[in-house]
Image: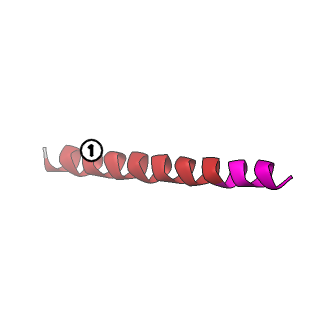
Amino acid sequence: LKTIVGALIQSVKKLSDVMILTVFCLAVFALIGLQL
């Protein structure tokens, strides 16, 4: 059970990193689009 929980936590951390990067990129593109 501990290994499953650990794997879940690790995957969630990786997913949150990807989500933050995606949101950041979208925000940058939105700002560039507004500037044009």
Residue situated in front as seen by the camera: 7 or 34: 7
In the picture as drawn, the residue positioned furthest to the front comes out as 3
Looking at the picture, the colour scheme in use is secondary structure
The residue labelled by disc 1 is 29
Kindly report the secondary structure that dominates the magenta region of the rendered protein: helix
Residue situated in front as seen by the camera: 19 or 28: 19
* Residue 17 located left or right of residue 12: left
Residue range in magenta is 1-9
Residue drawn where x is 23% and y is 52% of the image: 31
Residue situated in front as seen by the camera: 21 or 14: 14
* Residue 36 located left or right of residue 19: left
Mark 1 is surrounded, within 10 Å at the Cα level, by few (under 14), some (14 to 19) or many (20 or more) other residues, namely few
Residue drawn where x is 44% and y is 54% of the image: 20
Q: Where residue 16 appears, x then y in whole percent?
A: 53, 53
Q: Does 6 lie within the magenta span?
A: yes
Residue drawn where x is 41% and y is 45% of the image: 22
Q: Quadrant of the C terminus?
A: top left
Residue drawn where x is 57% and y is 54% of the image: 13
* Residue 7 located left or right of residue 18: right
Q: Where residue 35 appears, x then y in whole percent?
A: 14, 50
Residue situated in front as seen by the camera: 36 or 19: 19
Q: Does 5 lie within the magenta span?
A: yes
| Callout 1 amino acid | Phe
Count of picture labels? 1
Secondary structure beneath disc 1? helix
* Residue 17 located left or right of residue 25: right
In the picture as drawn, the residue positioned furthest to the right comes out as 1
Q: Where residue 15 appears, x then y in whole percent?
A: 56, 47
As drawn, 25 above or below 2: above
Q: Where residue 25 appears, x then y in whole percent?
A: 32, 46
